Amino acid sequence: MIDGGHHIDHRANTRGSVNAIDVDLAGIDVDALLAAFTRHPSANQWIYAGRSGRAHDGWTARPYTGTQPGERRLHLGIRATVEAEQDQRPWGLTEDNGMDAKQFLALLKDPTVATQLRALPWQYTGGGIPRGMSTLGVLNEVVLTVRALGEVVARESANPAEVRALLADLPAPPVDVEALADAVAARVLAALPEGAVHLSREGLAATVRTVLAKEQHSLIAAEVGP
């Protein structure tokens, strides 16, 4: 209900438009709300705590002595024009990162982003993971341990072939990129005549490591799928 003490823009104009609201301040970040409000092209005036700001005055805060000085509420009013009253542009109250839900989902479907997201869990090295290992390294050890234990069971079993057939269904263990790169570099350099290449073992291992890492990410992406 609007009484005589309220501003005229709280009443419907000849177009039936009410061009102002009073915002209850409970739980409201007034500074953030005012910042968003004053950025909008349709904003016209705010009144709060005995002060007021207007768009045509560059939003300069000045003393307000009129009715309803905004002691317990924040008065927000828009321009009294058809354009302002019908303006559908957002007020910036929830668009803090400039990205809506549709744009975010599109980003997740980007092949490069999707590949990176699938690879991240395998690179985790935090709590619950042995020092110096990643989740990929732990999985590698688990698979190898299960295979080794399975082979022990197979040797003691009355039907070793059946046990080994079950072990064959296990996925191939992930590659230990660091160890494999170092081993490849050592073997390549050992097979070449001395002085044939001007490349250190560490340099060659780094190159092999880069190639293997790319291949590993591609394999993970292919197994997980889109």
Image (tube, helix red, strand yellow):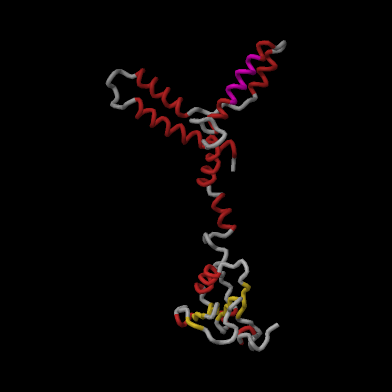
| Location of residue 32 in the rendering, given as x and y in whole percent from the top left corner | 53, 67
Q: Residue at x 49, y 83 (%)?
A: 63
Q: Residue at x 52, y 84 (%)?
A: 64
Q: Residue at x 53, y 37 (%)?
A: 126
| Location of residue 169 in the rendering, given as x and y in whole percent from the top left corner | 65, 24
Q: Assign the magenta stretch its main secondary structure.
A: helix
Q: Residue at x 42, y 22 (%)?
A: 183
Q: Which residues are magenta?
A: 142-152
Quadrant location of the C terminus in the rendered image: top right
In the depicted structure, whether residue 11 falls above or below residue 146: below
Q: Is residue 189 left or right of residue 178?
A: left
Q: Say which quarter of the image contains residue 210.
A: top left
| Location of residue 158 in the rendering, given as x and y in whole percent from the top left corner | 72, 10
| Location of residue 215 in the rendering, given as x and y in whole percent from the top left corner | 48, 34
Q: Is residue 148 magenta?
A: yes
Q: Is residue 218 left or right of residue 24?
A: left
Foreground pick, 175 / 153? 153
In the depicted structure, whether residue 167 falls above or below residue 63: above
